Image (tube, grey):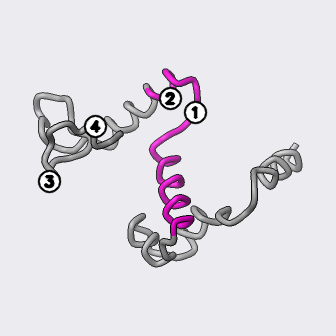
Amino acid sequence: MILEYRGDARNDEPVFPSPSRRDRGKPLSDRGLRRMMEEISDFAGIKFSAHFLRHTHATLAKKNGASDFDLQADLGHASPATTAKYIHHVGRVGTSHALRKKSKQR
């Protein structure tokens, strides 16, 4: 889907270019990315964010064999403990652990 979104963009061009005239051709700013995520979230009727996508990336990469060291580098974490927070749930079966945790919080 991202390749389709990019169209004819070269590999050295940003995946999400800025729509502003001033920054045309530059990567979308953090603020612009947050705004885009909010619009998509509102349109889809589900709550997610760019931070949620970081967790998704880490989880899928780990499930597909990425090492903790590689994930730490990809995510830009100084500490392996921070990276562990992103991937702590990988390997658990199903979603029942999340439901049990939610019911204990009540």
Q: Which residue is mark 4?
A: 4
**Pointers 1 and 2 in contact (C-beta within 8 Å):** yes
Please report the residue visible at 11 percent of the width from the left and 28 percent of the height from the top.
Answer: 21
**In the image, residue 17 lies in the stretch drawn in magenta:** no
- The secondary structure that most of the magenta stretch takes on is helix
Bin the neighbour count of mark 2 within 10 Å (Cα to Cα): few under 14, some 14-19, many 20 and up.
some
User: Mark 1 or mark 3, which has the lower sequence index?
Assistant: 3
Please name whichever residue, 23 or 97, is drawn nearer the observer in this view of the structure.
97
Q: Could you say which disc has been placed on residue 41 in the image? A: 2
Rendered location of residue 16, percent (x, y): 26, 40
Q: Which residue is mark 1?
A: 47
Q: Which residue is mark 3?
A: 12
Which stretch did the figure color magenta?
A: 40-64
Please report the residue visible at 12 percent of the width from the left and 35 percent of the height from the top.
Answer: 24
Q: Report how far apart the C-alphas of labels 4 and 2 lie in the structure.
A: 20 Å
Q: Nearer the viewer, mark 4 or mark 3?
A: 4
Outermost residue on the top side: it is 43
Looking at the rendered structure, the kind of residue marked 1 is Lys
Looking at the rendered structure, the kind of residue marked 4 is Glu
Q: Is residue 90 above or below residue 26?
A: below
